[in-house]
Amino acid sequence: DAGVIQSPRHEVTEMGQEVTLRCKPISGHDYLFWYRQTMMRGLELLIYFNNNVPIDDSGMPEDRFSAKMPNASFSTLKIQPSEPRDSAVYFCASSLSQGLTQPQHFGDGTRLSIL
Amino acid sequence: RKEVEQDPGPFNVPEGATVAFNCTYSNSASQSFFWYRQDCRKEPKLLMSVYSSGNEDGRFTAQLNRASQYISLLIRDSKLSDSATYLCVVNRAGGGNKLTFGTGTQLKVEL
């Protein structure tokens, strides 16, 4: 079975540029999550969707970050303009909604470096 | 206080040793608990769910103490391949499927 697919795997860009990260969740999963991981702060939830609708975006750092889920098989996380402090690994995860015991399945992540 | 707290380690143990990790959570309404494993430069992967009665999966045993808001993971007969960071994860009641991750405990198993 295909897992969560993220692209690109690595992204290096200069500050001020727009960055778009992409995610394809596992087919049939109705929850999608975007996380950011750094050495200092660990794994932080940025935003999550249920049935393509954003449920909680309280973790989004600021207005430079935005996320969309136009359909059940695709989501994007956009940073505009990017800053060096945005450098991190960004993970997308998906899960089913049957009760609270469903684990989340993570993609390989996008390693983002802003110069 | 962090919602999920873990000792960051590292725990350096010889192959074959038994090692235990602990985790505390602050929200008494938490309902689901997990241990995830993360290898260096890889994504987190579910290791095991933690049930109220405790549960075992091969060399791994997870325990939950709701009264003390405490979760543990025991690894017996540790292998070199067990070297990784172990993340304690909690799902809060009313939080949908939102998980809160601890910052992880690093384990290094040595020859």
Image: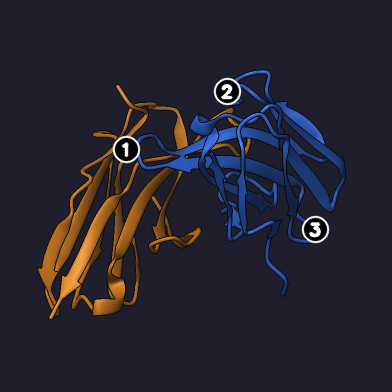
- Give the structural element (helix, strand or loop) at label 1: loop
Q: Mark 3 or mark 2, which is nearer the start of the sequence?
A: 3
Measuring 68% from the left and 23% from the top, which residue is drawn there? A64
Q: Disc 2 versus disc 3: distance between alpha carbons?
A: 29 Å
Name the element at disc 3. loop
Asked if B32 appears above or below B108 in the picture, the reply is above
Q: In which quarter of the image is the N terminus of chain B?
A: top left
| Three-letter amino acid code at the position of disc 3 | Gly
Residues at discs 3 and 1 both on one chain: no
A65 on left or right of B90? right
Q: Where is residue B77 in the image (x, y as percent from the top left)?
A: 18, 78
What color scheme is it?
A: by chain
| Residue with the mark numbered 3 | A28
Q: Answer yes or no: do the residues labelled 1 and 2 have beta carbons within 8 Å?
A: no
Determine whether label 2 and label 3 are within 8 Å by CB: no
Closer to viewer: mark 2 or mark 3: 2
Q: Could you say where residue B86 lies in the image, as x and y percent from the top left?
A: 33, 56
The residue singled out by tag 1 in the image is: B66
Pick out the residue farthest to the top. A63
Q: Identify which amino acid the numbered label 2 is placed on.
A: Pro
- Residue A33: image x %, image y %? 65, 42
Q: Residues within 10 Å of mark 2 (few under 14, many from 20)?
A: few
Q: Relative to the observer, which residue lies in front, B27 or A15?
A: A15
Q: Which chain is blue in the rendering?
A: A
**What type is the residue that disc 1 sits on?**
Arg
Colour used to depict chain B in the structure image: orange
Q: Which mark is residue A61?
A: 2
